[in-house]
Amino acid sequence: MKRTATGYVCTVAVLLLLVCSAIGEAQEPKIFRLGGAALFSEVMEAYGKIHERSHPECKLALLPGTTGEGFAKLINGEVDLVMASRHMNASEKAEANGKGLELTAKSLGMVGVAVIVNAGNPIPQLTMDQLRRVFIGEVTNWSEVGGSSEAIRVTTRAVPKSGPGVIFQQVVLKGAPYATGSQVMPSYQATAQVCRKSPGAVGYMPACTNWFKSVEYTGVRVVPLRLDPDAVAFKPDFGVVRKTPYPIVIPFYLYWNAGAPNKCVSEFVDFAMTQVR
């Protein structure tokens, strides 16, 4: 059977279209969406940039909010991966199961919650009991816990909206309310600013942001903590860690739907696990 010149031209044209289409698909990056707890955003954004160097086909899109918002978006198909400071609760799991999701979770590690004061505050360290008494308002002057005579100004984050605010209340205050008159801060930058300007101020922030990394150069100091008077005092490590003797930590979990296979998600989770110290 003879092929005409027109037939050859058509065949070549089709092949070229197929090749160009394949090249276009190979070069087109696949965006995977990461939602959930905003306090982990800077860490995951840094991981995403490193991961993209060896996996240019996978591009991370950050959609941070709260853990609860992240779970809701995962259930509704609005994100592919969630940063979580807690496990899914019963109602969230029921909703996910009702929509046929095959939830998978991995513990990435933990992040310390640093206690910060004004750089001029001479308090050398605090026990967990002293810290509790400060934040519930039982101790109102730094001289009562070994510091100078300065009225204490307690700052907190909104509860239950703020994950660190909830963790701090559970771990340090043992569920008790924050001191009457505590100032609820809109951000950790605002917490640091108050501590920088007010000699008696005290607050807390997660030890995983670039702001925290430079906080001790901005007129603020991180206070070492110890479990009891005879224990060794520790400061939190920067970033996400697997183990730490520091007593106030936030767990860090990653959640995704294994029922909707996404190579970028699975590869990124595996990569993130290798980055934790």
Image: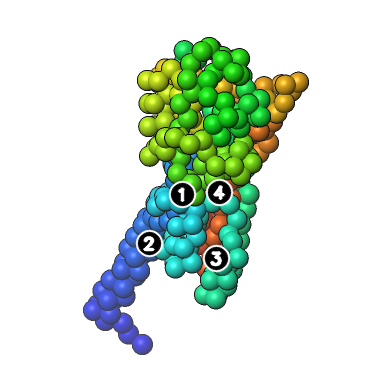
**Between discs 3 and 4, the one toward the N terminus:** 4
Query: Which secondary structure, mark 4?
Result: loop
Residue 37, how many percent across, how many down?
A: 48, 48
Q: Earlier in the sequence, mark 1 or mark 2?
A: 2
Assess disc 1: are there few (<14), some (14-19) or many (≥20) residues with their C-alpha within 10 Å of its C-alpha: few
Q: Quadrant of the N terminus?
A: bottom left
Q: Which mark is residue 161?
A: 1
In the image, what residue occupies the spot 28% across and 80% down?
7
Spatial separation of the CA atoms under disc 1 and disc 3: 17 Å
Give the SS element for disc 2: helix
Which residue is denoted by mark 3 in the rendering?
92
x 46%, y 63%: residue: 72
Residue 15 in view, yes or no: yes
Camera-side residue: 6 or 58?
58
Q: From the image, tell me which residue sits under label 4.
A: 85
Q: What amino acid is found at the position of numbered circle 4 in the picture? A: Ser
How dense is the environment of label 2, judged by Cα within 10 Å: few (below 14), some, or many (20 and up)?
Answer: few
- N-terminal-most mark, 2 or 4: 2
Q: Residues within 10 Å of mark 4 (few under 14, many from 20)?
A: many
| Residue furthest out toward the bottom | 1
Secondary structure beneath dot 3 equals helix
